[in-house]
Amino acid sequence: MNREKVVVEDAGVVVPVYVEVFDEIKRLFFMIDTGAAVTVIDERIMRQIGYTPVDSIGEAYALTASKLEPVYRYEIDNLTALGVTKRNLHVISHKLPEKLDIDGLLGLNFFDKTILKIGLELPEADIELTVKPLLTTAAKTSNN
């Protein structure tokens, strides 16, 4: 279990994120977004950390609040937040509103196989992230 206390900003619950890029660790700030199916990194940040559309693993469409927009998909070697590292995480690159002053959105794919608890006492949030143990086939069978 990993716990972290953060200040809730105008953008929402923002946490530090560490991305491994070409053997270098970059510190970024992402908002937790449980409404986003996939983790998003701002396209400006992707360029700053060395990714271009040529590095993408494909194209996709993102449904925003106003329309369906084309985006590039990437695979990030290591992305760490809240004490948990996800390897080979698929993300999309999309232009985020500058006024949010964040580098990305931690989407549901980052939280796969975890238990996320957010305790709010504004202006702070106490975040607890626990990695769920994988059940073996034998354990699944005995639980039925």
Image (cartoon, rainbow, N blue to C red):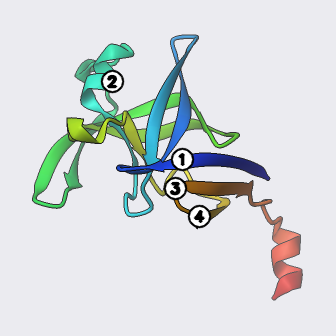
Kind of residue indicated by mark 4? Glu
Q: Which residue is mark 1?
A: 7
* Residue pictured at 80% horizontal, 59% vertical: 133
User: For numbered disc 1, what is the local secondary structure?
Assistant: strand
Front in this rendered view, residue 137 or 132: 132
Q: Which residue is mark 4?
A: 121
Real-space Cα distance between discs 4 and 3? 6 Å
* Residue 70 place in picture, x, y as percent: 15, 44
Front in this rendered view, residue 25 or 61: 25
User: For numbered disc 3, what is the local secondary structure?
Assistant: loop
Residue 55 visible in the current orientation: no
Real-space Cα distance between discs 1 and 4? 10 Å
Within 10 Å of disc 2 (Cα), the crowding (few <14, some 14-19, many 20+) is: some
Kind of residue indicated by mark 1? Val
Left or right: residue 54 versus residue 25 is left
Left or right: residue 140 versus residue 109 is right
Closest to the camera, between mark 3 and mark 2, is 3
User: For numbered disc 2, what is the local secondary structure?
Assistant: helix
Real-space Cα distance between discs 2 and 1? 25 Å
N-terminal label among 3 and 2: 2
N-terminal label among 1 and 4: 1
Front in this rendered view, residue 53 or 37: 37
* Residue 30 place in picture, x, y as percent: 44, 40
N-terminal label among 3 and 1: 1
Q: Which residue is mark 3?
A: 123
Contact, mark 3 vs mark 1 (Cβ under 8 Å)? yes
Which of the 4 image quadrants contains residue 24?
Answer: top right
* Residue pictured at 66% horizontal, 48% vertical: 5
Q: Which residue is mark 2?
A: 46
